[in-house]
Image (cartoon, rainbow, N blue to C red):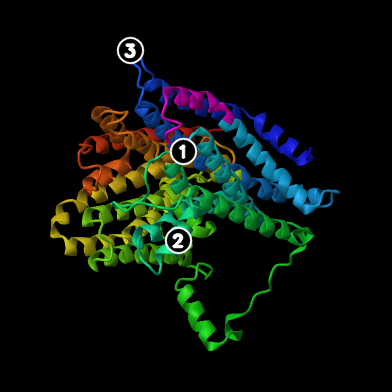
Amino acid sequence: MNPIIRRELLEVLRTPKALVVQFALGIACLALVLVRWPTSDVADLTGARGGEVLRIFGYGLLAGIVLLTPAFPATTLVREKIKGTLALLLNSPLPPWSIYLGKLGGVVGFTALLLAMTLPAAAGCYLLGGAARQGGIVMLYTVLGLAVVQMAALGLLVSAYAQSTDGALRTTYALVLAVCVLPMVPHAFFRGDALIGPAADWFRCLSPVPAVMEVLGHGDVGAQGMAEVRSVFPRYALMAVLCAVSCAAWTITHVSHALLDRARPAGVMTDDRTGAGRVLRSLFFLIDPQRRSRSLGLWVNPVMVKEFRSRRFGRSHWTIRLIALSAILSLALSVAAAAGAVSWGIENLCGGLVLLQVAILILFAPSLAAGLISAERESGTWQLLRMTPLSVGKILRGKLMSVALPLALLLSATLPGYVVLMTVKPELIHRVPRVVISLATTGIFAVLVSAAVSSFFRATAPSMTTSYIVLLTVCVAPFLIWLGRDAPFGHVTVQTVLTVNPVAAALQASATSGFTQYELLPANWWIMGAACSAALVVLTYRTWRLTRPE
């Protein structure tokens, strides 16, 4: 047996968090089955109830895999580099490919244990009937196994290049989100097109979502009444294997002694560049964060300035690039709607803008806020901050403002898309303010919850992972119940669950199809307000405790 697999598995399984994750996933899957377990003497011979439960069970497993799998491979190699143990591994008799297989086997082995904890619930779905009529339990677990290998290989590739655990987690979750969602966009836009349609059809098979939907017999994303002839499952298996093998080859060639002996590039002075190079550099660095700055004013929070100058995404040129990218994406979607290139309806396109903004919040809020306190404790600078005459309130205001301002600018960059949609359909003028309020509450909730989670950890990596899990549980998990609306969950149950989801409230405010029949506002605003207040109280109390003498 590969010794690295044994070490990686034992290291993970001996932590209390691994035990909690295993039992939590197993109990959650069992609860989904027990909710629809027959209580009367009448049997469902058609298997309809079993098919309904299998769908909720399958989507829940996919969400759990997407949430939990990337965290382990994204940090494994970068932690070895930080601790200095990667040099010991490279100097051992093990070849690079054996080291890689050991790391990959550890991740896949732990995920296999997680999937094994869900087998009793899968057996319950099979006994309820309907599993044979759909793709089947075996095909569902096959797709999930391929998704685990695909995401683990992607996380190991990022970990080989990353220099910090928080950066590795941020990049890996961004790539996983891109792999799961972006491949379906061209297929939805160009479905049926003779020129681009076949390529888009193959490209969407890179994502595990269409394969899971096919296995569960739930149609396709953006089908719009058009039937799919070719099966997605074999093409996804091919694309997932090719993706994993490509990432593995790339990682193995990079993980070598050259990784440790790599010299830092000397760089080129701006005056030594060509004229076009100087012009391009001036555009990329409109505001140079390294220039000598004047003294801080009396009314400027020094903690906020320190966060902006010490954090990569707090620097001006990175913020400008992200704002420009967000503005381009929102305007491109809006122009497509105005030109009539998409027949989804203005309301559904407004819902697409909402999902774009929520993706920005879920991706960037934990990466910025989850290290506000934990990063200071991990690096040892929290002791220096405690010795300053700054009060707890001033410290918190500076740190929260350093996160709130970039997020506000990113969300503001997508607002021109709403202007275009309101120009196309003036009736949206009354809906857009409610959408903006719901998104603002989502952003405040994401920042405060991530910051509160940060106060409980001494390291940034577990803090960021926990923040992602909490946010995705609140903002994404309720949609699993929404997928089972009318069967097996009734209207009242779905509305009650969606009331706590700020994303569903924004989609209902924009009149997106599938959410118009629910009344989620203003109840969701009150719930989010209470949750934000509770997170702020916890954050203030924990920060006050950490500033006290030990």
Which residue matches tag 2?
296
Q: From the viewer's perspective, is the residue at label 2 or at label 3 nearer?
A: 3
Q: CA distance from mark 2 to mark 1?
A: 64 Å
Which residue matches tag 3?
40
Q: Is residue 194 left or right of residue 305?
A: left
Tag 1's secondary structure? loop
* Of the image marks 1 and 3, the number of the one nearer the N terminus: 3
Nearer the observer, 366 or 43: 43
Relative to 472, is 427 above or below? below
Residue 461 location, quadrant: top right
* Of the image marks 2 and 3, the number of the one nearer the N terminus: 3
Tag 3's secondary structure? loop
Residue positioned most to the bottom = 275
Q: Quadrant of the N terminus?
A: top right
Which residue matches tag 1?
135
Q: CA distance from mark 2 to mark 3?
A: 73 Å
* Amino acid beneath label 2: Leu
Residue 550: tell me if it is visible.
Answer: no
Q: Quadrant of the C terminus?
A: top right
Residue 419: tell me if it is visible.
Answer: yes
User: What are the residue bounds of the magenta stretch?
Assistant: 116-134
Coordinates of residue 428 in the picture (x, y in percent): 17, 55
Q: Main secondary structure of the magenta part?
A: helix
Nearer the observer, 162 or 310: 162
Tag 2's secondary structure? loop
Coordinates of residue 402 in the picture (x, y in percent): 43, 53
